[in-house]
Amino acid sequence: MSAEPSRTLAPSARWVWRAEQALTWGVLVAIAAVASFQLDGALAVLARVLPIAGLLACVAVVPVLRWRNWRWEVHPQAIDIRHGTLTVRRTLIPVVRVQHVETSRDVLERSLGLATVKIHTAAGSHEIPLLRAADAGEVRDRIADLAPAADEP
C-alpha cells in the first residue's frame, strides 16, 4: 500500500475554499481599513495594501494548492488519505478499526452538490471532504461494507 493515493476531491471544492479564504481575508481587510485611520504615512498605506494583497493571493492560490495536494483511496485493508500544502500528512486508517462512517453536508456543500465523509475510530475521526454528494454516499457505503460488523468475533 505504499503507492500514493490517486483519487481527488470534487473540482468545486476549490470554490468552497475560495469562499472560506475570502471571508477570512475580508474580515482582515475591514479591520485593517479601520485601523489604518489611526496610523500615519507609509504605515497606513501598508495597513490597507497588505491585507488586500493577501486576500487576492490567498483566494487565487491557496484553494488550487489544497485541491492539488488532497488525495485519498479506499483499499480493502485501509483508507489512505494524503493532504497538506506546506506540511503533507498521510494517514492510513485500518478498515478493521473503523467503528462507523457518516456523510455530512453544510449549507455551502449542499448548494454545490458536495458532501464530506467522516470516518470514526476509537482513536478519533478523519474526513474526506468535499466529494460530489453521490460519490460521498458510495464511499461511505463501501467503507461500511469493508468494516467488520460489531457482532463478528
Image (spheres, rainbow, N blue to C red):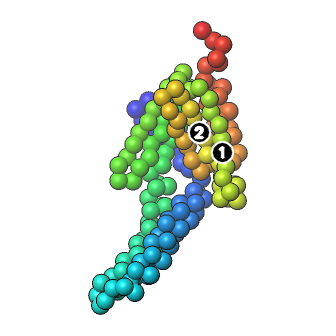
Residue 60 seen anywhere in this rendered image of the structure: no
Tell which of 142 and 104 is nearer to you: 104
Element at label 1: strand
Element at label 2: strand
Labels 2 and 1: the sequence-earlier one: 1
Mark sitting on residue 104: 1
82 sits to left or right of 147: left
Tell which of 23 and 111 is nearer to you: 23
Residue 17 seen anywhere in this rendered image of the structure: yes
Specify the amino acid type for callout 2: Lys
Q: Quadrant of the N terminus?
A: top left
Residue shown at 39% from the left, 53% from the top: 85
Distance Cα–Cα, label 2 vs label 1: 8 Å
The furthest residue to the top = 153
Q: Is residue 55 above or below residue 46?
A: above
Tell which of 85 and 6 is nearer to you: 85
Residue shown at 49% from the left, 45% from the top: 71
Q: Is residue 10 above or below residue 32?
A: above
Residue 112 placement (x, y as % from top left): 67, 59
Residue 16 placement (x, y as % from top left): 58, 60
Residue shown at 66% from the left, 26% from the top: 145
Mark sitting on residue 17: none
Residue shown at 44% from the left, 42% from the top: 82
Residue 142 placement (x, y as % from top left): 65, 31
Specify the amino acid type for callout 1: Ser
The residue at which mark 2 appears reads as 118
The furthest residue to the left = 42
